[in-house]
Amino acid sequence: MSLATPMQSPKAKNVTLVDRTLDENLPGKECPQTGGVWISGEDYQNWVEQQNSPEIDLEELTHRLREVNVTPSESDTKAALCPQCSRFLSRSRIETQPAFYLERCPQCGGIWCDRGEWEILGQLGVRSQIEVLCSGEWQARLREKQQSDRQRQATIDKLGEELATQVFKLAEALKNHPNGDFGVAYLMRQFDRVD
C-alpha cells in the first residue's frame, strides 16, 4: 500500500496542503499559510452533479457583483502552478468591488480559491457554476453587460433621470420598430446640422 504524495500549496513555497471539508461535503485541501483552498476537478464535478443549480441570471449576478465588497488576498496577484499536474493555473477575473481572480487548471479542472474567495462565491450563488463563470463566453457577456450599465449610468448623470428615461424608452422603441433605423438617422442628422 503506497501513500499519496502530499500536495504543495500553489501560493506558498514548501507548504503542504491539508485536508478540509468545504460546504456540503465537498472535499478540498487548504494551505495553512495563505488560507487558500484547492478543489480537485474530479471532486468538484462529483459535487456539482449533486447540486440543483439554476442557470446564472446575468442581470441578477451583475447586481450582486456590485454589492459584494472584497478584500483580495495578498496571494491573489501571484501566478501559480496546479498542485496536481504542475500546469499553470488560468485566471478568470471576477468583477466584484474590487475584482479578484479565480484560478483553474486547464488540464485537470482543479480550482484554487485564495483566502475568502470560496465564501464570496457562496454569497454570489455561483459555487456550483464555476466552469460557466470562468468560460470565455460568459466573461465576454458579463463585460458587455457591465459596459452597458456604465453607459446607462453615464447617460443619467449627463442628462438627468427624467430625460435619460425618455431617451432609453425611445431607443427601445426604435430598436423594436422595423424601420427604427430611419428614426436613428433622423436624430443623427439633427446633431450634424449647422445652424
Image: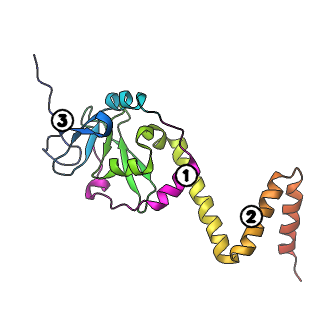
Q: Residues within 10 Å of mark 2 (few under 14, many from 20)?
A: some
Residue at numbered disc 2: 168
Identify the residue at image location x=63%, y=75%. Answer: 157
Task: Kindly give the residue lying farthest to the top in the view shown.
Answer: 1
- Left or right: 153 in relation to 166: left
Residue at numbered disc 1: 60
Residue type for callout 2? Phe
Residue 123 appears at what percent x and percent y? 40, 51
Residue 60 appears at what percent x and percent y? 55, 52
- The quadrant of the image that shows the N terminus is top left
Which region is colored magenta? 53-80
Residue at numbered disc 3: 7
Q: Dot 2: what SS? A: helix
Q: CA distance from mark 2 to mark 1?
A: 20 Å
Residue 68 within the segment the image draws in magenta: yes
Give the mark nearest the N terminus, 2 or 3.
Answer: 3
Residue type for callout 3? Met
Identify the residue at image location x=70%, y=76%. Answer: 159
Foreground residue, 127 or 155? 127
- Left or right: 190 in relation to 68: right
